[in-house]
Image (tube, rainbow, N blue to C red):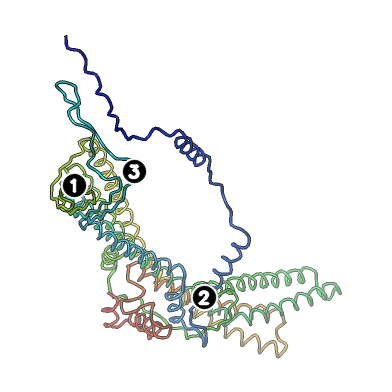
Amino acid sequence: MQKPAMPFPRPATDRRTPRRPGTVAVAAAIAALLAGCSVTPEPLSQEALTVRVNRNLASLTTGQEPVGKEITLYEAMARALKYNLDYKVAMMEEAVRSRELDRARYDMLPQLVANAGYSSRDNDSGASSRSLLTGRQSLEPSTSSERQTTGADLSLSWDVLDFGVSYARARQQSDQTLISLENRRKVANRMVEDVRTAYWRAVSAERLITRLSQLAGEVTTALDDSQELARRRNTSPLAALTYQRDLIDVERQIQSLQRELVIAKGQLAALMNLEPGTPFKLALPQRNALSTDFCMSGEGMMKAALANRPELREVAYRLRINEQDGTVALLRNLPSLRAFIGTNYDSNDFLYNNHWSGVGVRASWNLMSIFRYPADKRVIEAQTEWLGERERALTMAVMTQVHVSRAQFAFARQSLLTAARYSQVQTGINDQVQSAFKARQEGRQRLIREEMNGLLAEVRYDLAYADMQNAFANVYSSVGLDSFTPDVSSSDAVPVLSDKLQKLWLSRQDLSGATSATACTASS
C-alpha cells in the first residue's frame, strides 16, 4: 500500500511574514465602530425655515412684467400662460421627460470602459509546485509578480440583448415625453377656461361693486327709518315688519353678490400669478353676442374630440408603453451575446508582454427567466385590458362632454338674451319709479326695491355673459382644440403674446354675431 504523501518541507529561505494579531484587532475595532454608527433625524432649524420662506416669497414673481395699464381678457390669458405656476410645473415636467429621453439614448450605445489600478504588498507573492504522481516538491518557491504593480485596460463591448432592451426603454421614454406634452395641453386648456370665467366675473365686480356698497348703505338707512317709524307707531306693526323683511332680503342678496364678485378678482389675480393684494384694473369691454353656429356638426366635433383630447391621447401612449413592456419581457428570455475588444497594460516586469490586445465573444442565458415570462405576460395582458376599458370609459365621457358643452352654450346664449331683455325692462321700470318718487307718488321702499332689482338685473346680465363666454371656451376645450397654437409661445413678451391670443380667439368667433368661413377653417 502506498504511503500518503507527506507535505514537502518549507525551505529555510521562507520570507513569509508571521501573522500580526494587532492588525486583526484594529480591523475588528473599526468594524464595531462602523456598526455602532447610527443616523438620527435632523429637523430643519427655524433659521433654515425662515431662509426658505424668504427665498420662496422672493422667487414667486421674479422676472414678471409689471402690471401697468388696464388688463384685457387676452392679457390675462397671456399672463396666465407666461407666469402661472401650475402651468410652469407642467412645462418643467415636459422638459424633464425630454432630458430623460436624451439620457435614454445613451443606453443604446456600446460600453467603453477604462480601468486603472495599483497594488502593493509587503512581501513577495510566490508559490511552489508539487508532483501529483509522487507528492514531492517539483519546483522551488518562486515568484512571477512584483510587489508593486500598476495596470490599465480599455475595452469596448456591445451586448445585443442589452441594446434591444435599451431601445424598447427609449421608445417608452419617448412616449412618456408625449404624455407630459398632453398633460401640459390639458393644464393650459383648463387654465384658459378659468381665466375667462374669473375675468368676466371680475369685470362685473369692477362695474357694480361701488353701486352695491351704495345700495347697502341705503338699505341700512331704510331699515333704521322703518324701525323708528314702528317704534313711534306711525305705521302698523305688520306693515313695518313686512317692509323690514323685504329690506333684509335685499341686504342678503347684496352680501351674496359682493362675496361672489370680490372673490372673482382674487381668483383672477392668482391665475395671473399676482401677489394677493396687488392692485390692478380691468378693461371693461362691451358685451357682444356669440353665434351658436359652430364650424363643425355635433358628430364632427365628437370625432375631432376623440382624436384631439389629451386624456385619450395619453391612454394611447400608455398602450404603446405597455406593448414595449411585452417586448422587454420577451427579450429577457433570449440568450445574451456580448462582443468585446480591448487593449491592456501591466507594469509587472516578470511578464513577457506588458501590452496586449484581446477580442472575444461571450454568450449567456439565464434559464430561470423562462419561468418568469408567463407571469410577466399575464401582467401585461391585464394592463392592456385595463387601459382598453379606461379608453372606452373616456370615449363615452368625452362624447358626453362634447354634447353637453354644445347644449350648455346654446342655453347660456338663450339665458344671456333673456337677461338682456330683463335688464332693459327693469331699466324702464326704474326710470318710471324714480320719476314717481320725485313726484312723491311712490315711497322710498318701492324705490329701494326697484333699484335693487335693477342692480340685480345688471349683475345677472354680467354673470350670464360670463357663463356664455365660459361655455364658448368649454366647447373648444371639449373638442380638444388648444388654447394656443404653435406660433404662440410663452417666451414672448406679454403684449406680443396677448396680441397673438387675441387673433387666435377672434378667428374662432365673429364679434358681430355670425361665424365666418375663415373662423371655421381656423377652428377646425
- In the image, taking residue 335 as reference, residue 440 lies left or right, namely right
Q: Residue at the spot x=38%, y=81% of the render?
A: 492
Figure check: 508 above or below 44: below
Q: What residue occupies the far right of the structure in this picture?
A: 232
Please identify the quadrant where the C terminus is shown.
Answer: bottom left
109 and 451: which is toward the camera: 109
Which amino acid is tagged 2?
Thr
Of the image marks 1 and 2, the number of the one nearer the N terminus: 2
Of the image marks 1 and 3, the number of the one nearer the N terminus: 3
329 and 85: which is toward the camera: 329
Which amino acid is tagged 3?
Arg
How far across and down, in percent of the image, does residue 147 sit? 30, 45
Q: Secondary structure at mark 2?
A: loop
User: Looking at the image, do the residues carrying marks 1 and 2 touch, with CB atoms under 8 Å apart?
Assistant: no
Please identify the quadrant where the N terminus is shown.
Answer: top left
Quarter of the image for residue 500 reads bottom left
Q: For marks 3 and 2, give the CA distance.
A: 63 Å
How far across and down, in percent of the image, does residue 370 sit? 20, 37
Q: For marks 1 and 3, give the CA distance.
A: 18 Å
Figure check: 85 above or below 280: above
Q: Residue at the spot x=61%, y=77% of the render?
A: 453
Q: Which residue is mark 3?
A: 121
311 and 355: which is toward the camera: 355
Q: Which residue is mark 1?
A: 351
